[in-house]
């Protein structure tokens, strides 16, 4: 995720998640969303083939 | 003459049960200190003075009548303001829950009252526990007691817990820890605190930030106090389905002072490497002190740990968003803008991100397990820096520049992700007089060894006995 997010995309993603935030509110968080998506994309570089996601929390 | 406001829980318990001091005297001394100092420290949101004095009077009557008493009889306790308390408001440090009054105590609050502890009040915190700096726009920014001249961060999110115990306003405080919120304020305030294994202590009645990352635990002045309080808190709770049925050991009995032959893995890459020179030197000196006491120290690496931040963002972002979704739709303006923004970011985490985060979690947990198959404990700095000023936004770490928030949480978060027990103990002071914290990480459900190492270190060091100079 290296391309800058435009406001329309941001609005669309937020609405899909059920949030009707204003353009001003979305504009405020846009740089942080971009930074977060870059950070999250780094997970794709991990060698995770064959690693099952954690679904239980080691309860004994 | 013991200073009651700086006595440890272990000492107070002995003095009270030996009838050398009265619980009323102990509680009054703490309430007086709160009145004198908390106007500037801002560590309490609600002080329950009447309730505390009434409980102290009852505790005194029990002693006079010769009734059996608990292991923490009469010892003052502060509660981070996300622990439910029957009849006393529990705000989560928020405006949204400012008037919320629970009808029942959280399980651990009930257990600690049964053990004899006396609740002094509810402690300030980062709003909804979402941030490591310890700032709170609604109830005031907590002040770190170690610097009278500069308003420095107490660390968060359990900022009031850290400041209150460090300043002698409470003997013990409870914190909660989703990315380091017990260990960070312990590191910045010179305290000893433990984040137990996930599942060791009930979270029932504690406001959540991220169900799978939240841990609750004690913040104290010594490892022995942690042992005493943790034993009273821990154990299976039918109200929290994630609690373990494993029996709770006598952690005090584990504090033998003996670390001969114990295998200690020093985490250099990512951990020591990112610390400032003063922090790195202090932790290395602590490792040498353990070596001198008979431990076998070598270096160990967790290859994937740098992905813990991204993984935790996926997991915490999603879980926190789910808890806050309704308020984010209707009351966004009532959040501190910084906290509201952090919560909003969760709306842009996809299902694939969340699963990748959980895969990264499995990978990192396996690496920590493998390191702990060869070592009894791992050592690292708790925070790479000492307490920043509250105005500081950027800092310089051993491996480059960083924003303060990321720096504070960087070294603790991996063990929330993995669920391993980890404590922070004071291991030195920087040239500006600010405490440095060291993290000791152990195997799942082996808090006993973590505390044994912490206690053994405190028998050969005196950092934990130092006190801030306050007006």
Image (cartoon, helix red, strand yellow):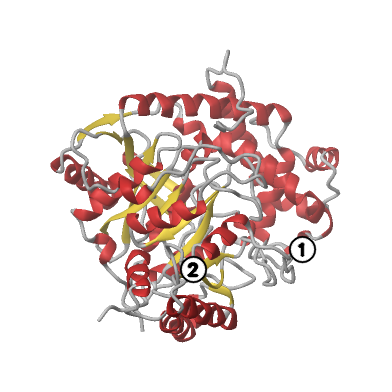
Does the image show residue B344?
A: yes
From what the image shows, is residue B464 above or below residue B235?
A: below
Mark 2 or 1 closer to N-term?
A: 2
Relative image position of residue B205 (x, y in whole percent): 66, 55
Work out which quarter of the rendered image holds the C terminus of chain B and state it. bottom left
Subunit that carries the residue with mark 1: B
Subunit that carries the residue with mark 2: B
**Residue occupying the point 57% across, 56% down:** B108
**Disc number placed over residue B77 in the picture, else none:** 2
| Element assignment for label 2 | strand
| Element assignment for label 1 | helix
Residue at the disc numbered 1 = B333
From what the image shows, is residue B90 above or below residue A18?
A: below
Q: Quick one: B360 or B182, which is closer to the camera? A: B182
Relative image position of residue B200 (x, y in whole percent): 52, 43
Classify residue B228 by image quadrant: bottom left
């Amino acid at each position: 995720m290296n391309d800058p997010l435009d406001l329309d995309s941001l609005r669309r993603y937020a609405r899909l998640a059920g949030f009707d935030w204003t353009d001003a509110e979305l504009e405020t968080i846009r740089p942080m969303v971009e930074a977060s998506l870059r950070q999250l994309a780094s997970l794709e570089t991990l060698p995770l083939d064959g690693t099952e996601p954690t679904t239980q929390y080691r309860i004994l | 003459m013991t200073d009651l406001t700086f006595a440890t829980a272990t000492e107070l318990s002995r003095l009270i049960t030996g009838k050398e001091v009265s619980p009323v005297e102990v509680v009054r001394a703490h309430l007086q200190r709160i009145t004198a100092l908390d106007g500037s420290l801002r560590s309490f949101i609600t002080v329950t003075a009447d309730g505390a004095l009434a409980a102290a009077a009852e505790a005194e009557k029990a002693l006079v009548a010769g009734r059996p008493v608990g292991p923490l009889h009469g010892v003052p306790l502060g509660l981070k303001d996300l622990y439910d308390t029957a009849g006393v408001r529990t705000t989560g440090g928020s405006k949204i829950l400012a008037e919320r009054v629970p009808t029942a105590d959280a399980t651990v609050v009930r257990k600690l009252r049964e053990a004899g502890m006396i609740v002094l009040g509810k402690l300030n915190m980062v709003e909804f526990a979402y941030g490591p700096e310890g700032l709170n726009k609604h109830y005031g920014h907590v002040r770190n007691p170690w610097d009278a001249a500069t308003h420095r961060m107490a660390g968060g999110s359990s900022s009031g817990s850290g400041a209150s115990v460090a300043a002698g306003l409470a003997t013990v405080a409870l914190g909660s820890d989703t990315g380091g919120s017990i260990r960070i304020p312990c590191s910045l305030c010179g305290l000893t605190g433990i984040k137990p294994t996930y599942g060791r202590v009930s979270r029932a009645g504690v406001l959540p930030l991220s169900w799978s990352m939240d841990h609750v635990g004690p913040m104290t002045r010594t490892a022995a106090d942690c042992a005493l309080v943790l034993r009273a808190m821990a154990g299976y709770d039918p109200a929290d389905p994630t609690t373990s049925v494993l029996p709770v050991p006598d952690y005090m009995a584990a504090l033998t002072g003996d670390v001969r032959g114990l295998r200690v893995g020093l985490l250099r890459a990512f951990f020591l490497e990112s610390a400032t020179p003063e922090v790195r030197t202090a932790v290395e000196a602590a490792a040498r002190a353990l070596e001198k006491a008979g431990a076998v120290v070598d270096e160990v690496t967790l290859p994937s740990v740098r992905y813990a931040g991204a993984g935790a963002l996926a997991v915490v972002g999603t879980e926190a968003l789910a808890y806050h979704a309704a308020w984010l739709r209707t009351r966004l303006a009532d959040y501190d803008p910084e906290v509201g923004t952090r919560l909003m970011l969760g709306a842009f985490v996809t299902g694939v991100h969340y699963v990748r985060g959980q895969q990264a979690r499995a990978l990192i947990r396996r690496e920590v397990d493998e390191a702990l198959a060869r070592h009894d404990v791992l050592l690292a700095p708790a925070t790479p820096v000492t307490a920043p000023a509250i105005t500081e936004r950027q800092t310089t770490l051993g491996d480059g520049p960083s924003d303060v928030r990321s720096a504070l949480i960087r070294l603790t978060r991996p063990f929330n992700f993995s669920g391993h027990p980890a404590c922070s103990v004071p291991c030195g002071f920087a040239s500006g007089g600010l405490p440095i914290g060291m993290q000791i990480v152990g195997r799942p459900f082996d808090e006993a060894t973590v505390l044994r190492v912490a206690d053994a270190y405190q028998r050969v060091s005196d950092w934990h006995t130092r006190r801030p100079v306050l007006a």
